[in-house]
Structures are given as structure tokens and as C-alpha cells.
Amino acid sequence: MRVQFAEIGGIPTRYYYEGSGAPLMLVHGAGVSGDSWLRNVDALAQNFHVVAPDTMGHGFTGTGAYTGGPPHPYMVDHLIALADYVGFKKFAMAGSSFGAMLSILTHFKIKDRVEKLILISSGSSTLSEEEHLKSVQNAYKNGMSAMTDPTLENCRARLGRIFYDPEKIPEELLWMQVTLYARPGVKDNYERRMKGMMDPAARQYRVAERMREISVPTLLVWGLNDPRVIYSRAVEAADRIERSTLVGFPECGHEPHIEHWERFNAIARKFLKGERIKDDREAGQGAEFGALAAAE
């Protein structure tokens, strides 16, 4: 796994990259960074050309022209500019949490270029407006608990609230978060983006009601013990997507690609290669969301 710094659409950007073959972009969630994919880049790069950026305003990537309000269009444009920069004419996208929503919005904007989608435990993509607002409020509170005082203990506690098994939090990911959250301006930028996601104007970027518009093969990977989602909403989303497969990970919270990285990498590889995957649409149907309350 290698690191590149580049000007992407006028924004200083860091991204990880490795491998060759069919292009794949990995898009992390809100308040984290491309380091979220540290268990996935090299494994998937055995078959694919993988790029995993810090999205706009995250990690070591700048904020560009964004000053407030819904960040969605700015972030999507930045991802498209990155795809252009690395030569991805047609590519697959895998997005975790808010990153899944950005991946869907990117697909909607350049439908002829995004060929496959992997959506990972994404409440922002599947919850109702009221449910989503509560989830974002909880995520904001949890993120601020670490960014206000970025110690190893606070970062561990933050991730521990969304992992099923806190013992599976990679130590190197924690140290990277301590480093990133200590950077000047990070907390203010995080607050601005999260408030923009909760802004009423962000309704125009909702995708939960637009799942039927997804026109490419789509894999949904959901943690069955995720405190930020409702599994039945993932089932509803999968039912609306014409070519979809839903896989539920038991004993798993909000980060299936980290908590069960070997299984995730194997399933993602099979899906991207066009191989058949067993659908778990009935799994965890009773697991509603004691979740959103638990993350408060």
C-alpha cells in the first residue's frame, strides 16, 4: 500500500493506492479517513487497482471552496476529480457509512462511469429522514468526544461505541486518529460538515427514496449489531435495487470491513469479479434499532 499527495480539483489531497486491474475507489465515512481501509487496500489490490482517498475535509485532505451548508456536492465533485486524476474512466466504488451515500451520489452524477457499488452499513443511505437525523446527531456527539480532546483513550472509546468487539479496533488506526484530530482546525471543520449534513437543505441529496435509480450491480454489507442503522431499512433498500445482494455480518457493528476484514475482502472480491454471493436478506430481521439510542 502506497501513499500519494496531489492537488485534486485544486484541493490538497492524500490517497492510498496499490495494485492493477479493474479500478476500485474506497470511500470512508464521516469523521474518519482513508486509514479506515488499512485492512482492505492490499488485499483487494491483489485483483484490482485500488485508490482510497481522504475525502474532502478529512485526514490530510483540504476543504477547498466549502465553507458551510450541505457538503455533499463538493465531496462528490472532489471524488470525480480524483477519478479523473488517477485515470479511472470506468470504476467500482465501495463506501462505508456516509461514504456509501457519496458513492451513490457519484453514481447518479456519472452513471456511465460507476459500474458497481458496495454499500457498507450506511444509515445515511437507507434510513428515513427522521431516523437519519437522529443517527447523524449521535455520530456528531460521538465524534466530538474524541476531537475535543484527542487522546488515545478518547479515540478508543469513540470507536468502541460503534464496534461490536472493541478488541478488534486496530491500534494503528487509533494512533492515526489521535494524530489527525490533533491537527489545527480539524474540530471546526468537522462541526461545519456535520451541521451541513443536518441542514434542511441537505434533503435534496437524500438517496433512500431513490434506490430504484441505481442501475448497476450493488452489494450491501451490513453489521447485524450496528448501532447506527436499522437492518430492515437495508432489506427495503436492497428490494428496490434491481441487481442487489445483501449480506449481514453477525457479531458486527458499524465497520464490517474492519471488524471482519477477511470475510469482507473475500466477499467484495467475489462480487467485483462477478461471482455469485448468497443473499442474507432474511438475516437479522428482528434487529431493529436499539442502535440509535445506544450510540448516544
Image: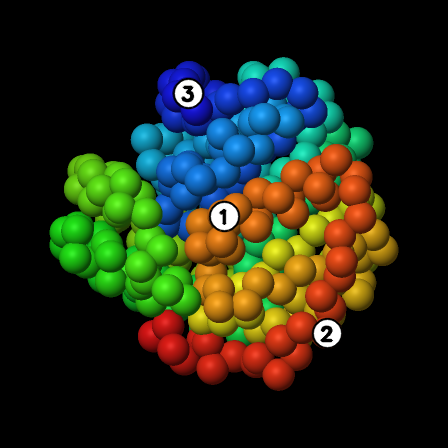
Q: Residues within 10 Å of mark 2 (few under 14, many from 20)?
A: few
Is 179 positioned to the left or the right of 141 in the image?
Answer: left
Which residue is drawn at the image coordinates 52% and 79% (left, top)?
Answer: 289
Task: Report which residue position mark 3 lands on.
Answer: 2
Task: Report which residue position mark 1 lands on.
Answer: 261
Position of residue 220 measured from the top left corner of the image (x, y, whole percent): 66, 56
Circle on res. 282: 2
Q: Earlier in the sequence, mark 2 or mark 1?
A: 1
What's the amino acid at mark 2?
Glu
Q: Earlier in the sequence, mark 2 or mark 3?
A: 3
Position of residue 224 measured from the top left corner of the image (x, y, whole percent): 55, 69
What's the amino acid at mark 3?
Arg
Q: How many marks?
A: 3
Q: What is the CA distance from the residue labelled 1 to the residue labelled 3?
A: 19 Å
Position of residue 232 measured from the top left corner of the image (x, y, whole percent): 66, 75
Q: Compared to 113, does 87 lie above or below?
A: above
Is 62 positioned to the left or the right of 223 in the image?
Answer: left
Give the quarter of the image for residue 194. Answer: bottom left
Circles 1 and 3 in contact, beta carbons < 8 Å: no
What's the amino acid at mark 1?
Trp
Q: What is the CA distance from the residue labelled 2 to the residue labelled 3?
A: 39 Å
Which residue is drawn at the image coordinates 51% and 22% (left, top)?
Answer: 18
Q: Residues within 10 Å of mark 3 (few under 14, many from 20)?
A: few
* Nearer the observer, 254 or 241: 254
